Image: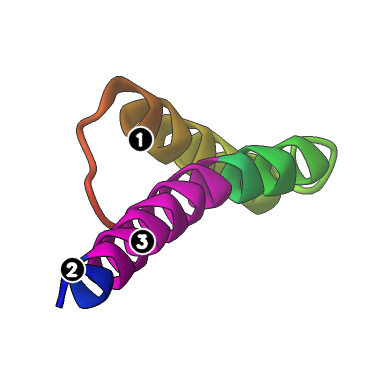
Amino acid sequence: MQHRGGIMVWIVIAVVILGISAYFGNEYRLDRRAHKLNSGTEEDRRLAAEMQDIARKIDEGKYLYR
């Protein structure tokens, strides 16, 4: 039964790593998309500013989920 507990620990570690990767991946994706939109129309620039604001809040830890 010791072997089964070890597998469970690795599964939990994998889920935590996946969650952290997804969390920071969203921030990066928003930031990259906002950068592309900054050179667009007025509406694109407004959307870019909102995306940058959300990315900043993610970075500050104010958003736990999308």
Report the mark closest to the observer, 2 or 3: 2
Residue 30 located left or right of residue 60: right
Q: Residues within 10 Å of mark 3 (few under 14, many from 20)?
A: few
Label 2, label 1: how far apart the Cα atoms are = 39 Å
Residue 58, numbered label? 1
> Which residue does the numbered mark 3 point to in the structure image?
10
Label 2, label 3: how far apart the Cα atoms are = 13 Å
The amino acid marked with disc number 1 is: Ile
Task: Give the magenta part as a residue range.
Answer: 6-27
Report the mark closest to the observer, 3 or 1: 3
CB atoms of marks 2 and 3 within 8 Å: no
Which one is in front, 53 or 27? 27
Residue 2, numbered label? 2
Label 3, label 1: how far apart the Cα atoms are = 27 Å
Which one is in front, 17 or 61? 17
2 or 1: tag closer to the N-terminus: 2
The amino acid marked with disc number 2 is: Gln
Quadrant of res 59: top left
Report the mark closest to the observer, 2 or 1: 2
Q: Residues within 10 Å of mark 2 (few under 14, many from 20)?
A: few
Q: Is-magenta flag for residue 26?
A: yes
Look at the numbered disc 2 and give the secondary structure of its residue. Answer: helix
3 or 1: tag closer to the N-terminus: 3
Estimate the x, y position of residue 50 in percent, counting from the top left.
Answer: 46, 41
